[in-house]
Structures are given as C-alpha cells and as structure tokens.
Image (cartoon, rainbow, N blue to C red):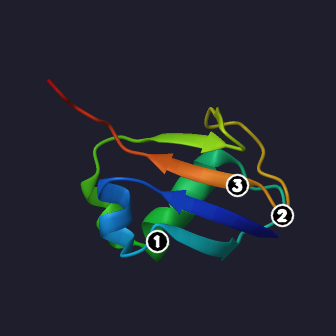
C-alpha cells in the first residue's frame, strides 16, 4: 500500500530527504513500519528514540497503517 513519509530534524538528515513515498505491506502496524524503516535506512538505528504520527496524530506501536496515510517521524527535540 502507498503511504507518504514526512521526516523532520535528524530523521530528514539521515534519510537525505524531508518527504518520501513508500510502499508498505498491507496490514502494517507502526511497529512493523519501524522495522521496515530500519531495514531501508540503516542510519535510523542511530536514533535512540523517535515518535511516529499518522495523519497528524501520535500513534502507538500497535496502530494500523492504512493506504494513503501520512506518516511523520518526529525525533526528540531539545531547547533552552
């Protein structure tokens, strides 16, 4: 199934892009998507943690991803 991936901060740097179109297997969950992402972009294994949002809402690992969903990778941020 076709999805759009938006990447922010260090995630965009690691993927060398801020937006990608991905083909994911049907019935993918956020957990299986994270595994897919690590396989496609081994550099992502360097990120200790990141949040995943689907269609502008934070998603848990068991959230089901659907056709044409927009998935965002949100790395931790720090500031002062």
Q: Earlier in the sequence, mark 1 or mark 3?
A: 1
- Seen in the image, is 44 located left or right of residue 24? left
Q: CA distance from mark 1 to mark 3?
A: 20 Å
Q: How dense is the environment of label 1, judged by Cα within 10 Å: few (below 14), some, or many (20 and up)?
A: few
Query: Measuring 46% from the left and 71% from the top, which residue is drawn there?
Result: 39
Q: Which mark is residue 70?
A: 3
Q: Is residue 76 above or below residue 47?
A: above
The disc placed on residue 39 is 1
Of the pair 58 and 9, the residue shown nearer to us = 9
Q: Quadrant of residue 68?
A: bottom right
Q: Residue furthest left?
A: 80
- The answer to whether the residues at label 2 and label 1 have Cβ atoms under 8 Å apart is no
Quick one: quadrant of the C terminus?
A: top left
Q: Position of residue 31 (x, y in %)?
A: 60, 46
Among numbered discs 2 and 1, the one appearing first in the sequence: 2
- Sequence-wise, the earlier of marks 2 and 3 is 2
Give percent across and percent down for residue 77.
28, 35
Q: Around disc 2, counting alpha carbons within 10 Å, would you say few (fewer than 14), some (14 to 19), or many (20 or more)? A: few
């Amino acid at each position: 199934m076709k999805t759009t991936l938006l990447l922010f901060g260090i995630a965009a740097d690691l993927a060398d892009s801020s937006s990608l179109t991905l083909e994911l297997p049907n019935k993918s969950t956020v957990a299986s998507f994270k595994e897919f992402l690590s396989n496609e972009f081994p550099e992502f294994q360097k990120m200790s943690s990141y949040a995943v949002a689907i269609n502008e809402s934070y998603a848990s690992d068991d959230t089901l991803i659907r056709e044409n969903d927009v998935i965002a990778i949100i790395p931790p941020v720090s500031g002062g």
